[in-house]
Image (cartoon, rainbow, N blue to C red):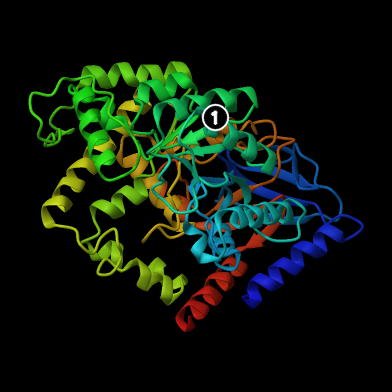
Amino acid sequence: MSWTFLLLSSCFLRQAEEAPRPRDLVLTGVTVIDGTGAPPPSNLTVVIAAGRIRTLGKAGEVSVPEGAQVVDSTGKFLIPGLWDMHVHTGSKEIFFPLFLANGVTGVRDMGGDLERLEGGNLSVRFEMLDRWRREVIEGKVPGPRIVAAGPFVDGPKPVWPGSIAVADEAAARQAVSALKKRGVDFVKVYEVLPMDAYFAIADEARKRGLPFAGHVPYSVSAAEASDAGQKSIEHLTGILLACSAREAEARDDILERLSAQGFGVKAKSTVPKTSTEPRRGINLLETYSDEKARALFARFARNGTWQVPTLSVAHVSAFIDDERVTKSPQLKYLPISLREAWSSKTNIFFKDRRPEYSLVRKREFQKELEIVGAMHRSGVGLLAGSDAANPYVVPGFSLHEELVLLVEAGLSPTAALETATRNPAEYLGLRASLGTVEPGKIADLVLLDADPTVDITNTRKIAAVLVGGRWISKREIEEMLAVLEAMAAKS
């Protein structure tokens, strides 16, 4: 464990145990981008006490508590703490400092097989995350707030080892019950779930008051998933398929191939075959229907089905042949062993990729940007999520990349910022305590040196981070990153 993380941990623990409570904090002269969409007022005084925003108002209208720590924030911009709504948390000694250094004060951990960064199986991984999130809330460990799924719930022969395998309705209901008892925040569904098992999960989760989210299985359509109450769709899974003018035929083709590969799913057989030969595949880009897309996006908006596009990981997949991806300076904070595992020359996702597939991925990525913009214009709720811990998706830094890509997709900088602040709080049912800069809210905040509503890349210009009102200065952030870099070079 790094000495900086130990020092910061001991500081947090001391603040949590000290009596009387830590000094009040006052930011003066600051411009507040509160996350509500209102025009940002400037020259405000913000008073933070007992971990929450006590009051904020124009200079001279707010009294400064006696003995408070006063920070002149003239020319700086205060935003709500950022959330990365799709991560796979690994080592807290690496991931937590990276998240905090980038102003990421909350994460939604999506489970999965990335426990290899810590060791142990998926059940152990969730227990570890559950312990960490309690330590963060109690102020014992500096880190982001964590919302977490347990293992994936997938079909009888899951895509990833360690997933909960379900073959039918009874097993699906049992899986939801077990996850509820384990204390997960939501159920994550995956790609090769049979149709009856998927709808059983939806029904059982609803009965138990447990959200479910994740990939849209190939056995159901994105429209059916939305109607069934899937709270969020990750990576735009199923969207291109659902927008194809030949959706039914394309779905049967995919299910036939998965069945042949032994995944235990069956085609719906809604489209008669004219030959006993396997179908050759439907080009989803060429058969994309704007009319079907408009209807689908209206359905998402009506049903409240959120989308987590994870454009960051999609960009890596499309541009893995670009050295700006594979030689990013952010990689220096990660262990050499991990960087080697990510290498496009050896990683299972990239090493055998054909050049023609790379061209297809680039075309698909451009279409995904268009889709995200169209969804936003249709009123579909969007959440910023990077899929951090996948190859070349560096924790913390990747959230800022996601915001840039959302702007590239057509969102305004203000709207993009809301996908990482207000929208996550709304999605998680935490609007009463998080997501905006308002009196009474928990003081998870980021102080910036420049205005992100003018240029979204200004979210990277971090002057300080507050986690539950605890101040992490720019100097401390630089120290954390310097230690991580030194550790990474030796590992």
Give percent across and percent down for residue 338: 42, 70
Q: Mark 1 points at which residue?
A: 170
Give the mark count.
1
Q: In this view, does 383 lie to the left or right of 410?
A: right
Instruction: Name which residue lies at 27% across and 22% down.
Output: 293
Q: How busy is the neighbourhood of tag 1: few (under 14 within 10 Å), some, or many (20 plus)?
A: few
Judging depth in this view, the residue of 75 and 54 nearest the camera is 54
In depth, the one of 65 and 154 nearer the eye is 154
Residue 468: x %, y % from top left: 71, 50
Q: What residue type is labelled 1?
A: Ala
Give x and y (percent) for residue 236.
35, 36
Kindly identify the residue that appears in the image at 62 percent across and 57 percent down.
Answer: 124
Residue 437 visible in the current orientation: no
Can you say whether 482 is above or below 188 in the image? below
The residue sitting at 72% across, 35% down in the picture is 439
Q: In this view, does 230 lie to the left or right of 299?
A: right
Q: Where is residue 466 in the image (x, y as percent from the top left)?
A: 66, 53
Query: As displayed, is residue 429 above or below residue 296?
Result: below
Q: In this view, does 393 lie above or below 311?
A: below
For this orientation, the residue located farthest to the bottom is 490
> Which one is nearer the viewer's eye here, 28 or 458?
458
SS for dot 1: helix
Quarter of the N terminus within the rendering? bottom right
Residue 461 visible to an observer of this rendering: yes
481 on left or right of 177: left
Is residue 367 found left or right of 66 in the rendered image?
left
Residue at position x 30%, y 55% in the image: 316
Q: Which residue lies furthest to the right in this view?
A: 19
